[in-house]
Image: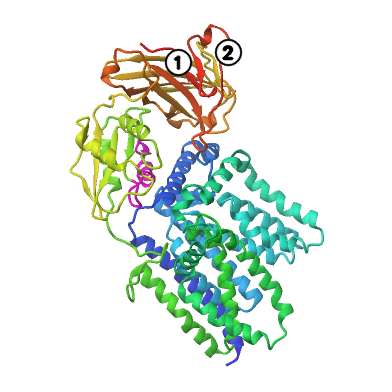
Amino acid sequence: MTGRPTQRKAPWLFALFTAVFAATTLVWLYLDRTPPNWDDAWYLTKSLAIYDALTRDGLVGYIAKVESAFTFRAPLIAMLPTPFYLALGRHWHAAYLVNVASMLLLFAAVYDLARRWWSSRAGFFAVLIVGTMPLLYGLATWFMVEYALTAIVAAAVWLLIESDGLARRGVVVLFGIICGLGLLLKASFSMFILFLFLYFWTKARNRIRVLLYALIPCLTVALPWYAFHLRETVEFGFAAGYGKTAGVYGTGAIFSFHSIASYLSNVVKEGISGYYAGMTVVVGGWTFWRSRKTRSGDEVRPRARAILLWLLPFAIYLFGKNKDVRLIAPILPAFALLLASMLDSALPRRGAGTALAGAALAFPLLQLYSVSFGVPVGTAEMGYARRFHRDSWLHDEILKTIAANVHIGPGDKPLVLVGTDVATLNPDNVELTAVANQLPLRIETTAHEEDLITVQNRLEGASFFVCKEGGQPESPFNLFFDRLARRVREDKQFSEISRGWAWPDGGVVRVFKNLAVHSRPAGRAYLNSGLQLSAEVEIAFGETLALNGLSASKTADALDVKYRWHCIKRPAREYKCFTHVLDSDGKFIGQLDHYLLDGDPPVRTWEPGDDALEEMRTRIPVELSGKTIRLRIGLFDPRSGERLRIEIPHGTVALGFSLVDGGTALLSAPVQ
């Protein structure tokens, strides 16, 4: 049999296996009932929120919501489900079709690259390898950035090759558009394509013109968002890669042998699989030995350089602090191309050679079904590659029970404090449930807080407290879970509203109602610039917002504080107000930290001349009801912790106020 029939069959095999992998992913998603984890729940929540803005306020409202909802993470992944919601309805499960569409793009790019460089058979091998690497078929079942990012990186590489050395103007422009979309998926996109682009660019004839053809469309797509969010995005990306949180995904000291070895082991086990790692060593050794007898180096080197430059960002993650394996997903297609080329070169072109390759690649295909479905044999999960679970998770029932136990008036958003922070029950998937069911509840968490007084005051102001007893242990970020859980069980201020919900991990979820929270929530109003208010105080915060009204009053066990805010110029960030309650000795006894107007509308959307009224309430110890207290007030950026500096003008409008904490906090007159 000649090699030609095999070449003609390869495109059909490509189409067949692409359909098989897509169908496998859809079946897995249909069968699985596991709730989304932290990041994927966060993105799904945002995708519903911006879709609601589109259906409620049209395209202008959609764009405004995207701009306000994403301040430190690129927004495109949450925008991509919008067409599926429009076509199939407002169900967050439809968002996973983004991964299926990304899979088609990824496979098409990988197949055509291998076909162009080597043969159609190599293209089929590459698709089969990409489809059976644990990290990639695992990520196809999560709603996170990395799978779509992998597809768009592969598409960008394909366009670079298709451009004939950046000589085809239209393809270069399309490459720039793809790069802009990639940046809107994740800022790290640039790292995966930069080295390869520079390689082709340095060889281009007219470098300035080529650069403009690529750069202008890229900036046209990405700059409207990054112009307002670049600093926050860079800070968040650096913290994710090298900050305190990144250490949770680390393997030890960055340059230690143990850290490097552990990471490489994880990459092999959870990323490419041990089978493909072993196959690469064997087939690679055989290919290298054979290549010494041929003179095809001039033809092979450009392809080898392209693959090497695509793989180069791996070194950054190898020596980074965050060793989460999913971050290297965009370079795995390059590995698949490398292995596919070696298989295509090592095996005869006859049908027997293709059959032998098919037999060799059958094992990872069987492993995919064993890991994902438990057939033909049960196999342990491999990182992000996991088996579907049919257990019932009761987030909907819990949130609907909470909503039935509180009166929610127009504009009210009772606070639900989630005291548990585990994969199956956390503030992100609880908020997703609230948004999906259109329940007007505000969700906050006790996790990621290192100050006990802060979480205690957060508990005091919450209408409900949700926690899980037993089962999967708490995350290391939830430092005060045991204290708060014990408090709500023992304090008569809290009453359990149900007998609890049995959780599939063996725990029990309990919900406690805070009986001390006043039945009426904090009042608030937003007034546009057409309704100006007279100023009683005129205290400016960073020349952005002004406090032009403040009053406080005490009852036997509570403190009511009324604020009136005035917008001087449109804020660049979503600032948060801190209000610390101090006794006569300056001791901290409570707080009223909050987003202005609970973020509705977001501060970033305020225009100069707009005003806002709000009223907050907190409990104070009964023994202080007859004593003098004071308030310490300021505005800060919750992402960086940076406070706005305060300016107090001369005159009676500022009477009774003083500056503290280096001019970043305002100390009020005594409250009797």
Residue 511 found in image quarter: top left
Q: Nearer the viewer, residue 169 or 259?
A: 259
- To which residue does mark 1 refer? 668
- Dot 2 surroundings within 10 Å: few (below 14), some, or many (20 or more)? few
SS for callout 1: loop
Q: Position of residue 589 (x, y in %)?
A: 35, 24
**Near-viewer residue (137 or 655):** 655
Residue matched to label 2: 649
Q: Nearer the viewer, residue 338 or 642?
A: 642
User: Outermost residue, top direction?
Assistant: 652
Residue 10 forms part of the magenta stretch: no
Residue at the image position 46 percent from the left and 57 percent from the top: 97
Residue 355 located left or right of residue 431: right
Report the span colored magenta: 421-444
Q: For numbered disc 2, what is the local secondary structure? A: loop
Percent across and percent down for residue 200 are 73, 63
Q: Quadrant of the C terminus?
A: top left
The question of residue 441 being in magenta is answered with: yes
